[in-house]
Image (spheres, grey):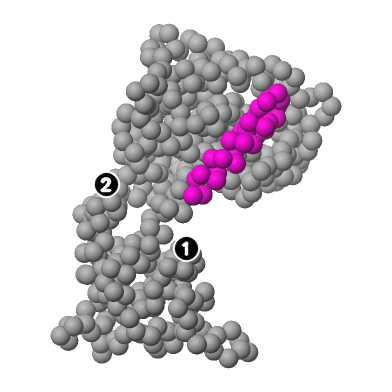
């Protein structure tokens, strides 16, 4: 959210003269009387919205509104505190992702288009007066076969907020040097991008066009002059309004990081007036709610907990399952992502690594016919199921043998085990016998 801040080691920044060199965040406050735009902005955004919708079919009206506002917001990056990402994702090729990037390239502020960019190059081209980063085919950077690219992901995450520089040793004197990371960025990908990026993004979930959905063919010789003209109009309209935009602290319909991400878009809408303030907030609510639902259903680690619950249930809820049996059952689900996890599919190491975040670890257990193997006790999952998959609480059957009761609250006697899952972490020695 907007707030009063100043560059370290300097005095307050005059919001009427945004500091393009330092990229500092100007003081917030209400716009003065008569400073808001009166009609020109609304008409220009309407025109931009129509132009974007002419070349690409977006998943909803709210998505089209969001893209329009995101494009306009790139032209006031120098006074923003947060730089929202635009995640353009689709399940397959041919969903219009690259066409969205084509349109963005001709309308955003100083675009840099790439299909693959190293971290070293990225933080050197951003600069103190941020440009707009456009990354097509981002699945080749962050896809399951591309490796984690943690350094690049970290840079993109840091660049969502101002004053998060990347420090490097540079020059013959090996002097520690801060490089700016703050810049708006759009990334197009087959499949989801890393959670930490989509959490900082306005997400467009593209689909292939239906047979009856038509678009105007994108031909550079015709489309580029039209879209560049709109780009120049946006710059001319918003240029004198930088001071006003820098002082705005709009009322947001969402909180926390979602508010940080959507605030620049709402600022543009409030500057434009007309129907745009209401349309922007409606799009914000609809799209953030949808993503919250998507995250709950598709988050990989939550999906793993749900699938493990299903495997235990399919085996009659035994006290424990070996790591091998658990991994084999997970890989056999054709609709699950586990067969494509990592380079060769999910294995016991991956399973242990993902479950470690839930404080669930394998141990040695004895199984049928005295077989000893690494495995997982069902009662160790109860707390995580209750916390992260609460809808399973009502339907989860009792295990085949007594599970460990929840640790009692201080000062209260322990309660007898019930059929529902405990809310607290399980404790005590109950569970399958470990091999010695």
Q: Is residue 433 above or below residue 318?
A: below
Crowd around label 1: few <14 · some 14–19 · many ≥20 (10 Å): few
- Which residue is most to the right? 33
Kindly indicate the quadrant of the structure image that contains residue 377: bottom left
Q: At x 47% / y 17%, what residue is drawn?
A: 54
Q: Is residue 94 magenta?
A: no
Name the quadrant of the C terminus: bottom left
Q: At x 49% / y 21%, what residue is drawn?
A: 53
Say what secondary structure mark 1 lies in: helix
Disc 2 + disc 1, Cβ < 8 Å? no
Q: Is residue 308 above or below residue 8?
A: below
Q: Position of residue 83 (x, y in %)?
A: 56, 38
| Foreground residue among 265 and 285 | 285
Q: Position of residue 170 (x, y in %)?
A: 46, 43
Q: Position of residue 165 (x, y in %)?
A: 54, 45
Q: At x 68% / y 26%, what residue is drawn?
A: 275
Q: Main secondary structure of the magenta part?
A: helix
Provide the residue designation for mark 1. Answer: 391
| Dot in front, 2 or 1 | 1
Name the quadrant of the N terminus: top right
Q: Is residue 216 left or right of residue 76?
A: left
Q: Is residue 243 above or below residue 305?
A: above
Q: Which mark is residue 273?
A: none
Q: At x 75% / y 35%, what residue is drawn?
A: 247
**Which residue range is magenta in the image?**
265-293
Q: Is residue 92 left or right of residue 225?
A: left
- Which residue is most to the left? 369
Q: Which mark is residue 145?
A: 2
Residue 121 visible in this rendered orientation of the protein = no
State how far apart marks 2 and 1 are (Cα): 33 Å
């Amino acid at each position: 959210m907007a707030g009063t801040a100043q560059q370290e080691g300097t005095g307050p920044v005059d919001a009427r003269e945004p500091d393009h060199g330092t990229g500092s965040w100007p003081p917030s406050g209400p716009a003065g009387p008569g400073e808001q735009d009166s009609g020109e902005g609304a008409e220009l955004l309407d025109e931009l919205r129509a132009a974007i919708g002419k070349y690409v079919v977006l998943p909803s009206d709210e998505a089209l509104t969001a893209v329009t506002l995101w494009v306009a917001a790139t032209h006031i990056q120098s006074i923003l505190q947060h730089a929202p990402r635009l995640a353009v994702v689709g399940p397959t090729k041919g969903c219009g992702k690259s066409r969205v990037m084509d349109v963005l390239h001709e309308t955003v502020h100083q675009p840099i288009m790439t299909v693959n960019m190293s971290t070293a190059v990225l933080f050197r081209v951003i600069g103190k007066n941020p440009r707009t980063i456009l990354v097509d085919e981002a699945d080749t950077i962050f896809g399951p076969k591309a490796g984690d690219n943690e350094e690049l992901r970290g840079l993109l995450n840091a660049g969502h907020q101002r004053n998060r520089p990347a420090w490097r040793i540079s020059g013959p004197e090996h002097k520690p040097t801060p490089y700016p990371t703050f810049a708006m960025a759009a990334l197009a990908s087959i499949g989801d991008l890393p959670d930490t990026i989509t959490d900082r993004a306005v997400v467009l979930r593209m689909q292939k066009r239906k047979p009856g959905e038509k678009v105007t063919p994108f031909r550079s010789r015709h489309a580029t002059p039209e879209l560049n003209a709109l780009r120049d109009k946006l710059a001319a309209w918003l240029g004198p309004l930088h001071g006003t935009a820098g002082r705005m602290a709009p009322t947001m319909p969402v909180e926390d990081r979602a508010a940080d991400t959507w605030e620049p878009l709402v600022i543009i809408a409030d500057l434009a007036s007309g129907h745009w303030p209401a349309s922007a907030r409606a799009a914000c609510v609809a799209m953030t709610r949808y993503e919250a639902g998507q995250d709950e259903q598709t988050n990989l680690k939550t999906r793993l907990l749900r699938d493990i619950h299903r495997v235990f249930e399919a085996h009659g809820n035994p006290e424990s399952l070996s790591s091998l049996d658990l991994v084999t059952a997970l890989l056999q689900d054709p609709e699950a992502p586990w067969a494509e996890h990592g380079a060769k599919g999910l294995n016991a190491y991956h399973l242990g690594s993902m479950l470690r975040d839930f404080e669930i670890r394998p141990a040695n257990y004895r199984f049928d016919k005295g077989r000893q193997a690494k495995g997982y006790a069902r009662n160790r999952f109860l707390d995580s199921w209750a916390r992260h998959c609460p809808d399973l609480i009502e339907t989860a059957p009792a295990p085949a043998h007594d599970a460990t009761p929840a640790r009692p609250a201080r000062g209260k006697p322990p309660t007898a085990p019930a059929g529902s899952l405990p809310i607290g972490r399980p404790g005590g020695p109950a569970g399958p016998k470990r091999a010695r």
